[in-house]
Image: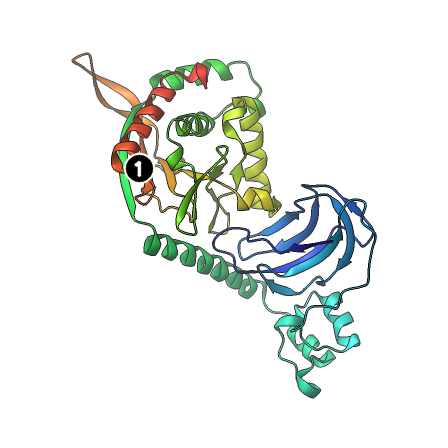
């Protein structure tokens, strides 16, 4: 038997609220299958199981808010027979059966309530009071405040713990623009490639030469990523930021990446992300070119060790073979962790990125 615990869905998460189970006791599950939906301060996340098994017991009820690491369920290994039922973990709020049933119906997190009953038990009246409607605007402000809070906590940790260094590189983009125009010629609009996809693929390929910029810093040491899982910074419509991963970017074609990026943006803004997409980016790429900024000086998302930023692609003066030209260029930036790499290697990485973008047909 093994325990299925609430995973950390990003460095800025310390607790979550179980919204629903998508399985029940007795169900066989496969590695990667979505078994639950958990609400974090940023979004509702589809949580995947990490190994095959059969659901034995669900230990947390929908509506409960629990810390990261809480045992959500127990499962039987393949071929294992069920044993005795395990007791529920201690420390749960005392609550009457009627109040629990009402809390489930109303979606109230009973674990967060201060009970007014005997011995601090949560009563039906406590649940009803907690479920009293609030103005929609107030609820929205709470959500935004929670999201800003977790972002602030993660970024404060990053600036406190990670010794950042920053580098900038101006990259000519004429070849990439011409290649992109030719590639998109005759394509329906829904299948056209964006410059952002070329940049993401170029970053992943350049990281193959500089693996010290791709991975995580945990427990006092750097663990390089086995592949480039590129987190893409996506702005939420109501404010805030989420950076889910495109997995194993180096192995995928531009067309495949374009499809996955469009799907990722849609699902992020619809609140339908998977836990693996949130938990395992090995580097983040942020692109604020559409907003018109010249360059991005980003903050590394811990425990990652690097962030690559792109500003707008715009016509700028450029000297080539002694001649002054007006060429489209972009300013690429690198924020990297001095515990793992230094400016020399970071500069070489940006040079590699520049060269990759001069040969878009090879991406």
Q: Position of residue 173 (x, y in %)?
A: 34, 21
- SS of the residue under disc 1: loop
- Quadrant in the rendering for residue 257: top right
Vertical comparison of 42 with 343: above or below: below
Q: Is residue 362 left or right of residue 292?
A: right
Residue 130: x %, y % from top left: 64, 74
* Residue located farthest toward the bottom when viewing the structure as drawn: 118
Kindly tell me whether residue 132 is visible in this rendering. no
Q: Residue at x 66, y 60 (%)?
A: 71
Seen at 27% across and 34% down, the residue is 168
Quarter occupied by residue 94: bottom right
- Up the image or down, 144 lies above or below 215; here it is below
Q: Nearer the viewer, residue 270 or 79?
A: 79
- Identify the residue at horizontal 58%, vertical 67% (top origin): 135
Residue 324 visible somewhere in the drawing? yes
Quarter of the figure with residue 285:
top left
Q: Where does label 1 land, which residue?
A: 295
> In the rendered view, does 363 fall on the left or right side of 158?
right
- Place of residue 170 in the rendered image (x, y in percent of width and height, measured from the top left): 27, 28
Looking at the picture, how far across and down is residue 310, in whole percent?
Answer: 36, 34
Q: Residue at x 38, y 40 (%)?
A: 307
């Amino acid at each position: 038997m093994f325990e299925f615990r609430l995973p950390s869905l990003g460095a800025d998460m310390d607790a979550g609220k179980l919204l629903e189970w998508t399985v029940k006791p007795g169900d066989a599950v496969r590695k990667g299958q979505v078994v639950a939906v958990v609400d974090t301060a940023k979004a509702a996340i589809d949580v995947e199981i990490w190994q095959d098994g059969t659901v034995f017991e669900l230990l947390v009820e929908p509506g409960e808010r629990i810390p990261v690491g809480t045992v959500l369920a127990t499962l039987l290994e393949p071929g294992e027979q069920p044993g005795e039922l395990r007791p529920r973990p201690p420390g749960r709020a005392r609550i009457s059966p009627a109040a629990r049933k009402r809390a489930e119906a109303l979606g109230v997190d009973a674990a967060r309530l201060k009970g007014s009953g005997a011995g601090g038990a949560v009563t039906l009246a406590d649940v009803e009071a907690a479920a009293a409607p609030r103005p929609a605007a107030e609820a929205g402000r709470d959500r935004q405040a929670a999201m800003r809070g977790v972002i602030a906590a993660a970024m404060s940790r990053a600036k406190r713990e990670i010794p950042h260094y920053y580098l900038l590189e101006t990259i000519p983009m004429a070849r990439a623009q011409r290649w992109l125009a030719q590639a998109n010629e005759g394509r329906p609009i829904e299948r056209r490639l964006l410059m952002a996809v070329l940049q993401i693929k170029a970053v992943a390929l350049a990281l193959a030469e500089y693996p010290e910029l791709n991975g995580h810093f945990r427990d006092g040491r750097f663990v390089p990523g086995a592949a480039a899982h590129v987190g893409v910074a996506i702005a939420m419509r109501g404010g805030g930021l989420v950076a889910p991963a495109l997995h194993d970017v180096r192995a995928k074609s531009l067309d495949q990446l374009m499809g996955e990026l469009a799907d990722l943006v849609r699902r992020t803004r619809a609140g339908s992300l998977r836990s693996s997409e949130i938990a395992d980016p090995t580097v983040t790429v942020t692109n604020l070119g559409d907003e018109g900024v010249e360059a991005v000086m980003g903050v590394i998302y811990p425990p990652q060790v690097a962030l690559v930023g792109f500003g707008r692609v715009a016509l700028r003066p450029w000297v080539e073979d002694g001649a002054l030209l007006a060429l489209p260029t972009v300013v690429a930036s690198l924020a990297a962790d001095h515990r793992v790499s230094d400016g020399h290697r970071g500069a070489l990485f940006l040079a590699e990125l520049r060269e990759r973008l001069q040969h878009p047909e090879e991406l």
